[in-house]
Amino acid sequence: MTRAPRDRLLDMLASCDAIADHIDRDDADEGILFDALRMRLFEIGEAAKDLPTGLTDTEPEIPWSMIIRTRDRLAHHYFDTTHAIVFEAAHHEVPMLAQAVHRMLAILDEAGPQEPAR
């Protein structure tokens, strides 16, 4: 069963929020934190790949194809993933993505029950 764009955005937002919570913890073991961040970045990419183009086009500054490629890399080349890339994404890119997701949810709210077509 295909999930609605709104549900995908909410999944992304939940992962963005979890990442923010994880990086704010002072007591987190670096290895565990790295694994948690990688999984949440994977989830963001998984949700992003099924968003309709008409919706992602409303946020052109977000590198959607890079987010999806990152998901593929985390899934298939996880052993090549460096700490620096994961922590950079968590600290800098994810907060901007969360803001974009909030704006996209507002667009869907304004559109009502009919969501942008693929």
Image (tube, grey):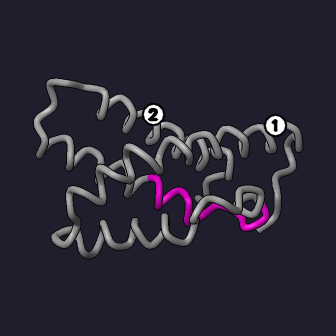
Q: Is residue 51 magenta?
A: yes
The residue singled out by tag 2 in the image is 17
Compared with residue 109, is residue 69 higher up or lower down, i.e. above or below?
below
Magenta span dominant secondary structure: helix
Q: Is residue 116 magenta?
A: no
Label 2 crowd bin: few (<14), some (14–19), many (20+), radius 10 Å: some
Compared with residue 84, is residue 11 higher up or lower down, i.e. above or below?
above
Q: Quadrant of the C terminus?
A: bottom right
**Residue beneath the point at 25% across and 44% down:** 36
Q: Secondary structure at mark 2?
A: helix
| Residue in the foreground of this view, choosing between 69 and 75 | 69
Indicate the position of residue 49 as horizontal and vertical percent values: 55, 66
Q: Mark 2: which amino acid?
A: Asp
**Residue beneath the point at 45% across and 33% down:** 17
Mark linked to residue 50: none
Q: Secondary structure at mark 1?
A: helix
**Residue beneath the point at 31% across and 51% down:** 39
Q: Which residues are magenta?
A: 44-54
The residue singled out by tag 1 in the image is 109
